Image (cartoon, rainbow, N blue to C red):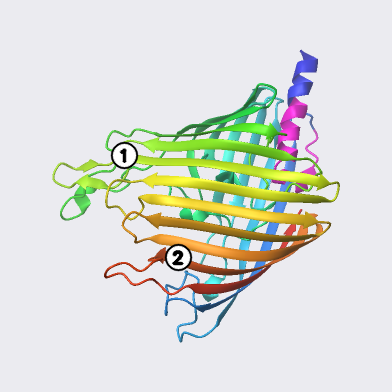
């Protein structure tokens, strides 16, 4: 039994080390029953915007109110993370995040809990977790902000129905099966529901999800080469090992999409579907090529601006400390409104892996607007953006 417990404890530690906690500072606790790791992530950014729609909202990237080139200095992320194991069978993780602090001179942003889970590991490769959880759909939807190539992920086209930073409260499992060839990740989550009194509005607003049904979400992946055990998935591993996988995912919650009929107070179901491929192929001990490609379908009901199709893609090639990379995302709503498109290319220099690096990127995008001409709907002017970002993680 002692051998089994020791194996579980060591496996739990391996899971944590495979995540961003690999950069962690180990804090002595004075007992073998508890381990504590502290991690700091700092991302300082300078961003220049030009062209695009005039006078955008203050928190949306765009030119200065005069229409001229706009410069912003702000903190993209400031995170403090505590993680570890407890009593051999349990894991824990909590992340405090202050995102986009100082953007457009706004220092009113707050620090909040972005991730929090308590996990139980009854056997190797089997995790049960409860808390504020990263929602499964695709590999890119579960990407690590620390170990990424692109400076921004595809979050703008992941139109979840009630998530904060792609997270929701819930209970889930993460399991590797058949000699780690199959990954299953998913569970039940809070999802959308009315959190104000319907009678407080005039006329009264029908309640969303009146039955209080939870949201179901999951992802299944086939590992063609290698495997991934982490809670967050790196885009660029830097460890000389290759990983290739394909996956499908879905989210579903009844009566929590768009309002279907105001008279009866009925709502459409919310459905999200995803399929993707991920590859990080180590060509030599000091070079690797990365590829991520995914397709999405979000369905809130006919006529809703969030109902539509999406794509994302990312490529990169690292040789030594240098990695050129390119990325794009696209979402076109069925109504041709509330659409997104972005194409970007950049260069990363890794002074010491992901622990100390700097990245630069040039992007062209249209956010939450009309991306192609349509009758009565002229295309929104494209925004151009230059970003330079420094990162320290320890």
Q: Secondary structure at mark 1?
A: loop
**Circle 2 crowding by C-alpha within 10 Å: few under 14, some 14–19, many from 20:** many
For label 2, the SS is strand
**Would you say residue 382 sits in the magenta stretch?**
no
Q: Residue furthest left?
A: 263
Q: Residue at the top extreme? A: 1
Would residue 25 be visible to someone looking at this image? no
Pick the front one: 200 or 224: 224
Give the labeled residue for mark 2: 367
Q: Is residue 42 left or right of residue 270?
A: right
The mark that comes first in sequence, 1 or 2, is 1
- Give the quarter of the image for residue 229: top right
- Residue at x 31%, y 57% (from the top left corner): 335
Cα distance in 3D space between marks 1 and 2: 26 Å
- Quadrant placement of the N terminus: top right
Q: Which mark is residue 269?
A: 1
Residue 336's label in the rendered image is: none
- Horizontal side of residue 105 vs 243, given as left or right: left
Q: Residue at x 53, y 31 (%)?
A: 172
Task: Name the residue rendered at 79%, 15% in the picture.
Answer: 2
Boundaries of the magenta span: 9-30
State whether residue 309 appears in this view. yes
Q: Is residue 341 above or below residue 18?
A: below
Name the residue furthest right. 285
Asked which quadrant contains residue 338, the reply is: bottom left
Task: Please state the horizontal and vertical placement of residue 189, each as a whole percent of the image.
Answer: 45, 36
Residues 136 and 393: in front is 136
Specify few, some or many for label 1: CA neighbours under 10 Å numbering under 14, 14-19, or 20 or more.
some
In percent of width and height, residue 120 lies at: 62, 27
The image shows residue 311 at horizontal and vertical percentages of 50, 52
Q: Is residue 29 magenta?
A: yes
């Amino acid at each position: 039994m002692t051998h089994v417990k020791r194996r579980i404890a060591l496996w739990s530690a391996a899971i944590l080390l495979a995540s961003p906690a690999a950069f962690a500072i180990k804090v002595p606790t004075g007992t073998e029953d508890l381990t504590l790791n502290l991690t700091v992530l700092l991302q300082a950014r300078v961003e220049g915007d030009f062209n695009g729609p005039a006078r955008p909202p203050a928190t949306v990237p765009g030119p200065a109110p005069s229409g001229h080139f706009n410069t912003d200095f702000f903190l993209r992320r400031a995170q403090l993370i505590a993680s570890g194991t407890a009593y051999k069978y349990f894991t824990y993780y909590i992340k405090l995040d202050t995102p986009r602090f100082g953007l457009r001179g706004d220092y009113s942003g707050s620090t909040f809990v972005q991730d929090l889970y308590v996990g139980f590991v009854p056997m190797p490769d089997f995790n049960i977790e409860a808390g504020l959880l990263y929602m499964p759909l695709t590999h890119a939807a579960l990407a690590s902000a620390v170990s990424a190539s692109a400076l921004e992920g595809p979050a703008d086209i992941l139109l979840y129905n009630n998530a904060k930073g792609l997270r929701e409260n819930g209970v889930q499992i993460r399991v590797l099966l058949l000699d780690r060839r199959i990954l299953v990740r998913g569970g039940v989550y809070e999802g959308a529901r009315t959190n104000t009194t319907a009678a407080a509005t005039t006329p009264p607003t029908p309640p969303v999800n009146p039955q209080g049904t939870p949201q179901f979400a999951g992802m299944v992946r086939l590992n063609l080469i290698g495997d991934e055990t982490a809670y967050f998935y790196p885009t660029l591993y830097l460890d000389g090992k290759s990983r290739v996988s394909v996956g499908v995912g879905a989210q579903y919650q009844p009566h929590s999409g768009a309002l279907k009929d105001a008279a009866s107070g009925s709502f459409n179901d919310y459905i999200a579907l995803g399929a993707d491929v991920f590859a990080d192929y180590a060509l030599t001990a000091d070079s690797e090529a990365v590829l991520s490609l995914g397709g999405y379908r979000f369905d809130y009901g006919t006529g809703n601006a969030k109902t539509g199709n999406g794509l994302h893609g990312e490529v990169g090639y690292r040789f030594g400390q240098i990695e050129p990379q390119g990325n794009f995302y696209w979402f076109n709503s069925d109504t041709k409104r509330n659409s997104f498109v972005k194409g970007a290319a950049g260069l990363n220099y890794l002074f010491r892996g992901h622990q100390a690096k700097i990245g630069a990127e040039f992007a062209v995008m249209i956010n939450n607007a009309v991306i192609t001409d349509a009758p009565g709907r002229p295309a929104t002017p494209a925004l151009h953006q230059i970003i330079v970002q420094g990162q320290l993680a320890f």
